[in-house]
Structures are given as structure tokens and as C-alpha cells.
Image (spheres, rainbow, N blue to C red):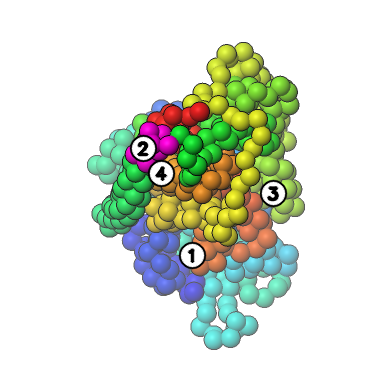
Amino acid sequence: MVHGRGTYLHVKGVEREMRKKAMAPAAVAALLLCFGIAGVVSSASDHRYKPEDPVPLYANKVGPFQNPSETYRYFDLPFCTPEHVTEKKEDLGEVLNGDRLVVAPYKLDFHVNQDSKVVCKKQLTKEDVAKFRNAVIKDYYFQMYYDDLPIWGFIGKVDKEGKDPSEYKYFLYKHIHFDILYNDDRVVEINVHTDPNALVDVTEDGDIEVEFLYSATWKETTTPFEKRMDKYSQSSSLPHHLEIHWFSIINSCITVLLLTGFLATILMRVLKNDFVKYAHDEESADDQEETGWKYIHGDVFRFPKNKSLFSACLGSGTQLFALTVFIFILALVGVFYPYNRGALFTALVVIYALTSGIAGYTATSFYRQLEGTNWVRNLLLTGCLFCGPLFLTFCFLNTVAIVYSATAALPFGTIIVIVLIWTLVTAPLLVLGGIAGKNSKTEFQAPCRTTKYPREIPPLPWYRETIPQMAMAGFLPFSAIYIELYYIFASVWGHRIYTIYSILFVVFIILLIVTAFITVALTYFQLAAEDHEWWWRSFLCGGSTGLFVYGYCLYYYHARSDMSGFMQTSFFFGYMACICYGFFLMLGMVGFRAALLFVRHIYRSIKCE
């Protein structure tokens, strides 16, 4: 990868420099658009300024371009550090997003041009030079916010004229030029250039005196203030991107319709034949031996083993389903605009806390339907089933971030806030939901009476065991979403902007339909083989798509990304494990609910002695 760059963050300049870097088009779009996704609220709330008024400029973070989770505070690199570093107050979502804003050392007053103004003269020690050289080698970028507008650029370049890596030259940019566009009394756009001739050679260790400079040029534009964020959200709306998305949707729909239609036709014909056969058998010979799924009508509604854990899985899955639906609603009404990523983290924390009552009610009411008695233990299990692994993962990854001194490490105050939300909101709502579920008088609706002793399950071939059935169940839903998964991964673990939530919602609906249908089909085949232990099997088959998604994580990490290092790797696989576990619980709940409806329907349609 060639690192020769002269100019950054002006649209055409970035494209030109990215051609030099021989980067994929996705990376070009990434660098242009990615860093405008964390919302920052300006101190000048109305964004109106008079000439020579100070305009807020915040430095946010620096980090390797290929490792989006590995970011550090701006002044962790030995730039011109003021005597008193002023930090900006941030909301919960911004902190969770890894933003750590401080007042930048550049003074860009409204409508005031600057020409090669000195920020500071600094004597870099050997250690400082080594830090900068390491940052240039790892392709570090910086990110700032000027009047809420995101700006970013690389801190240096690598000259690879020599074929041998030992002959590479490493240079640090020391002169930044700001091009600022304004309309009347408002800032509309800002672009950043780095002077390709103002370089500092940091190849060799040694003390160096560096004079850091900056310039600013103000120009008038006719672009209205209301449209100043449009350029940050255009990436995923470009025609060729839309074509890819719609092609993937149509491809998934056709595949799903063909496969589900094929299965539905077979299933309906088989069921119809079963109903006719069983009705004929009842009329002709009452003492005739029963076969197939009617044979096990006295066992099919026998409650599953570990019913407390099963109910807790259903409760947690229902809560995560509600959380996903609410997030989609907020996304479709335009809450998560491209440069306001912090809002997504805030919404996840708040909505998860508020929906905990759903988990408590669903788990406890179903547990009581299964004639469970220790509802308090069931409620505790429900509360810890998803939060427990997530908390343990967070503790490990936060420790890693602290060791790396990365901005992903949450401050102690933020951890206290999250603990208080869990203690004062999540836990009480979980208990209230559990009490309401315990007091609900709903009984389990079983069309057939359950016999006293379970029938023995006949020997089954290997492909009817749980693991092969899960593999078959997870493949079809995964095949319907895997194309869209790339765009989601490139947004969450890369630098793309994802704004086409309507398409994502369509994919989500397809996922639910396919998961429900494939689970119903496999449940029928299981019952037809006289295997009546379908409760856990339907849940595991429904949730198996989550395991396929985690398998895709391995592929994405090695084949589609350039992530490296222990911190980025542990963050990627750690948090993706939690997300896929959440998918497993949610889709498992969907699969079981669909299977339960189906089983009740078919056994209600025949006479059960």
C-alpha cells in the first residue's frame, strides 16, 4: 500500500490521494464519510456568529485507520499541547462511542483568515519522534469537530521509493490548511489540506525542533445551512450502492420465495394426506396401530427439561426482539442521522433498560404455564442470561482498553451511570414484569392430554440429531441476509456510513419469516419421525443463524478487513460474540413461537384420545 499523500479531506483531494494509496473504493468513501457519525453538540447552540467571534474547534481522537476500535486521545501524540487541556462535556452515547473531545490548539475565529500562523515551536525528543514514526507506520488519522462539522486527515506519510522496508522514509505533516465555507453568519463546510512540502523527517531517532503551523481561508457559498450535512450521508445513497442493495434484496426474496414455497407445498400436501389418513383410520379400525406424528400425541406437549432456563431464554429473546423493533422504529423516523452515532448507543442502553419488564413478564408467565414453582430463581436467571455474558465480556475488553490507554476504555463515572441505570430501572422493571407474569392466570393451551409416562424415542439417523438439524436450519436464513451483512459490518467495524434503514428493515422481516418457516418444517419432520422432544430443538434451530453470523465474523476478519492487533481483534470477536448470542436468543424465540403455533394447530385438527 503506497502512503504518499499531500492533501486530505477535500473530496477530490482524498480521492486523488486514495488512488495513490491504491485503496478500494469503499475505503475512499470511508475516509470521506466515516468520521462524521458521532454527534457533538456545539457550545454555540444556534450556530450563528459575527465576524471575529470564536467558533468551537474540538480535537477528538487519533488512531490506526484499519482499526476503528483502537483510538487514542488526540494529545496522546506529542502535538502542541496547551498548558491547560479543556475537555468538553459529553453525553452517554458519545462516551460509549469512544469520543473524548478537547479544545484544539488551533484558533479559527469566524471570517478571520490566517496565513502560516505558528501553533508552537516544539523540541521533539527521541521518544516523541518514535511515537510519531510509529503513528505514521500504522497509518494514523486524526479527527476534529469544527462547529459540529467533522474533519479528519492523516498525520503523516510513508515514502516507499526504496524497495526494501528498511529504506522507507517516514514524514510528519507540520502545516495544516483549513478551507472554510460560510453562508451569511453560519459555517457551512470545512475542508482540510496538509502541505506536502511542509514535512518533518521522523525516520531516524533523534531530537528535532518542529514548528507546527496552520492557515485558514474563508470563502462564501450559496449552500444553505440546513444542507451542510448532506455530503456526509450521500455514500450509501449513491446509485451504484442502491443497486447493490436492491439486487441483494431481490435475490434474497426470490431465493426465499422459491425455497419456502417449495417447502410449504410439500408440507401442506403431506399434512393434508396425514389428516385424510388419520380420519380414515379412525373410521375403519379403532384398534389399528398409529404411526407418525399422531402416534406421539400423548407426549408432544410434555414440558421440556430445564424449563426455568427455557423460560428465561424465551423472556430474554422476547426483550431483544422488542429492542430491535424499537431501534428500527427510531431509525426509520430519522433519529440516527449519519453524524449522530452516539444516539444509537444511548438508545440501546435506554430501550434495553425500559424493555426489561417484557423479559420478566414473558419468562415468569411461561414458567408458571409450565407448572414451575420457583419463579424468583427463574426471574434472576432471566435477568442474568444476556446481561451476565455481556458484563463479563465488557469487563475483559474494558481492561484491555485501559492497558492500551485507548478511548474505548470507559471512565469510572460512565460505568457508575450504567450500573445505576441497571439498578434503578432495569432490575425494578424486571421484578415488576415478573410479578405480573406470576399473577397471570393463563394456563398452557394443549389440545391433547399428556400421558403419565413418556414414550421411547425410536433410533434416529445421524442427520436427525440436534447439531445437523441446527446446521440445516441456520443456513437458509443466513443465505437471505449475508449480502447485507457486509454493509453492516463495514459500517460497525469500518468507516462506511449506513443510512438505508428501510432496506435493512425489509431484510429483517425476511429473516423472521424464513426463520419461522424453516423451524416449522424441521419440527414437522422431527414429529413425523416420532421424536417428541421438539421444544428445545425448535429454539436451537431458530437461533442457529446467530452461529452462522459468528462464522461470517471469522471470514470478514481474515478476508474483508485489515484489522490487526490484540485490542482490535479482541474487541471485534468479543462484542460480536455478544451480538450473535443476542441474535441466537431472539431468533430462537421466534422459531419456538412459530413451532408452538404449528404444533397446536395440527394436533387441534385431529382427534386425540
Report whether 501 appears left or right of 387.
Answer: left
Q: Residue 304 placed where, x, y %?
A: 63, 36
* N-term-proximal mark, 1 vs 3: 3
Mark 2 → mark 3, Cα distance in angstroms: 63 Å
Depth check, mark 4 against mark 1: the one in front is 4
Circle 4: element type:
helix
Report whether 142 appears left or right of 310.
Answer: left
- Residue beneath the point at 48% across and 51% down: 473
The three-letter code of the residue at mark 4 reads: Phe
Q: Considering only vertical position in the picture, is 371 above or below 174?
A: above
Q: Residue 104 placed where, x, y %?
A: 56, 45
* N-term-proximal mark, 1 vs 2: 2
- Residue beneath the point at 59% across and 69% down: 137
In the image, the segment drawn in magenta is 276-285
Residue at which label 1 appears: 560
The three-letter code of the residue at mark 3 reads: Leu
- Residue beneath the point at 54% across and 86% down: 163
Circle 3: element type:
helix
Few, some or many residues within 10 Å of mark 4 (<14, 14–19, 20+): many
Residue at which label 2 appears: 280
Tell me if I can see residue 413 in this picture: yes
* N-term-proximal mark, 4 vs 1: 4
* N-term-proximal mark, 4 vs 3: 3
Residue at which label 3 appears: 397
The three-letter code of the residue at mark 2 reads: His
Residue 443 located within the stretch drawn in magenta: no
Determine contact: label 1, label 3, CB under 8 Å.
Answer: no
- What number is the disc on residue 517? 4
